[in-house]
Image (cartoon, rainbow, N blue to C red):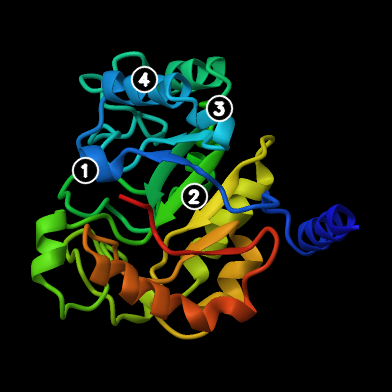
Amino acid sequence: MATALILSACLALQAAARTVRSPTPPMGWNSYNTWNCLPSEDKIKTSAQGLIDLGLDKAGYNFVTVDCGWPSEDRDAEGKLQWNETLFPSGGKALGDFIHGLGLDFGLYSGAGYLQCGSEALPASLGFEQLDAESFAEWGGDSLKYDPVGRFQLELCILLTMRRYDNCYSTSNTTMVDSSSAESQSPARFQHMAAELDAVDRDIHYYVCQWGIGTDVGDWAAEIGNTWRISNDIYNAWRSIWRITNQVVPYFRHTTVGAFADMDMLM
């Protein structure tokens, strides 16, 4: 009976939106908390193998996600994103094949701004949504974490406890943080990428990393995302967990099977 109810809820959500939904919150490993915006092919492969060696895959940790720092500074002549050849000499498709060969899912990351945060040069996906969604599918991506913000260094997050949620390069490629602008608070950028992911010939889970900026975020984010972030970054202290736990409470009305409020990654 319970299984039938869960299946019915999943089907209802998929009928309302084509974004791929999971019946339970997604589980896996993301490179950011360990490697910040300095991932590499060897680091990702070692960590993916670690999920297998430690048996975490059997507990449901099936996603391996490459977070910020993977692209080259330049798109190719056709405007397509390129992997940094020094950090990822085999490229995205080969990395995806390696992760799939372990029986795991390949998670990708991009930003909903002109550039990735913490960078003055690494391209994000604003204005290239269709082309980038097609690339994510070609590389064998199984999920996309779509971030309006990249990351300040963790130490800076701890020091700037009173800052507004950063929202990077949403209005130009010169102003990194402008979280109060209409562009930063609008759902349009995330809805655009959701539509482009729907158009590709591959099932891709969509993780909206919007940070709860603006009003009624749960209303629109639950319609397009398998998960959506509701707060600033976690950091390695109990008070951070206490803060996020309180912040997530109002989102209970939007959270259901296939639509999960995201409290950030455990450290």
Q: Secondary structure at mark 3?
A: loop
* Amino acid at circle 2: Glu
Q: Quadrant of residue 147?
A: bottom left
Residue 129 image label: 2
In the rendered view, would you say 205 is above or below 55?
below
Residues 47 and 98: in front is 47
Q: Does the residue at mark 4 contact the one at mark 3 (Cβ under 8 Å)? A: no
Residue at x-position 22% and y-position 36%: 73
Question: In the rendered view of the protein, which quadrant contains the N terminus?
Answer: bottom right
Q: Residues within 10 Å of mark 1 (few under 14, many from 20)?
A: some
Mark toward the start of the polypeptide (1 vs 4): 1
Task: Answer left or right for 160 relative to 231.
Answer: left
What's the distance in space between the residues labelled 1 and 2, CA to CA? 24 Å
Mark toward the start of the polypeptide (2 vs 3): 2
Q: Nearer the viewer, mark 2 or mark 3?
A: 3
Q: Does the residue at mark 1 contact the one at mark 4 (Cβ under 8 Å)? A: no
Q: Which residue is mark 3?
A: 140
Mark toward the start of the polypeptide (4 vs 2): 4
Mark toward the start of the polypeptide (1 vs 3): 1
Task: Answer left or right for 9 relative to 25.
Answer: right
